[in-house]
Amino acid sequence: MIDFAQNIKLNFGAKYVAEDTASYILYKFDRASLNGGAVSMERFARFLGLEIMCEYITGDCTEILGTAVFEPQRIYLRCGFADCVAPSAIVERDVIESGNGALYNFTLAILCAEYLFYRVKNGEQENGQLSFGLESVESERNVSANINSAFALIEAEEGAASFALKLLLPKNGFKRQVAELYAQFGVNRATVDGERHLPAVLESLAERYNAPEAAVAARLKELNLY
């Protein structure tokens, strides 16, 4: 568990401060994650102290990805409810059953980012639950988002979705991987062709990092690599 008492003034807002914060957190978690390797968000979630659950929230992962629960409370699901005792990351079961490991990893990254936000802002939240699309009587202040709006937040470089990208695709290692792929094609950022080269670049990086291609594309733009 990260000791946030040693770094109480973490700021997720400014672009470069957010990059440094993500690097700091990943360094505490696993130094190897900064050297170009994919980060296991399942391991990372457990490292943060989150219990991982897979439940039907709506039964459609195009609408709801998951819910982060930070304090003991009852969460209402599509069929019934779950009493969460420990901080939990509840992933929509349809994400698992679809077999989309990249979307599962991305979902956990967002839920981990929300939990990190909560930890840093502890005391400012009126309620312990932040949700993605789940309305419940237990949650007066929840954050609702479908996958499309999550990527819209990435484009705007705001919120947990954008910070999740920095955890899922660590800057230094990611930039090295992109440079290596560009070198294979004999191109660089200025000469890469969106139609000829980008599909192969996205496919390769998405497989390497177990992340959705849309997330990889957003990260390329965020780091001015395309």
Image (cartoon, grey):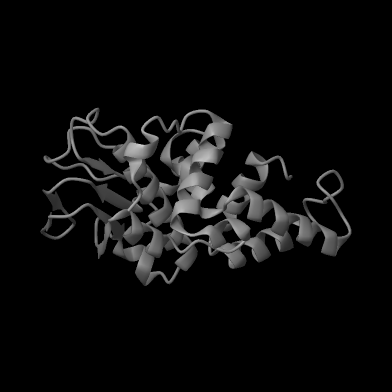
Report how many numbered discs are placed on residues in the image: 0
> Viewer-proximal residue, 115 or 196?
115
Q: Is residue 144 visible?
A: no
Report x, y in % for residue 7. 39, 36
| 141 over 46 or under it: above or below | above
Left or right of residue 74, residue 88 in this image: right
Q: Where residue 212 appears, x then y in whole percent?
A: 54, 58
Q: Position of residue 178 (x, y in %)?
A: 72, 56
Where is residue 12? Give x, y as percent.
Answer: 45, 33
User: Which of 52/196 is in front?
Assistant: 52
Q: Is residue 218 left or right of residue 45?
A: right
Q: Is residue 120 above or below residue 146?
A: above
Residue at 77% x, 61% y is 181
Identity of the residue drawn at 39% across and 56% down: 108
Direction from residue 79 to residue 199 in the image, left or right: right
The quadrant where residue 122 appears: top left
Residue 40 appears in view:
yes
Residue located 63% across and 60% down the image: 36
Among the 4 quarters of the image, the one containing residue 84: bottom left
Foreground: 121 or 156? 121
Q: Which residue is at 53% across, 58% downward?
A: 31
Looking at the figure, which quarter contains the C terminus?
top right
Q: Residue pushed farthest front?
A: 6
In the displayed structure, would residue 142 be above or below residue 193?
A: above
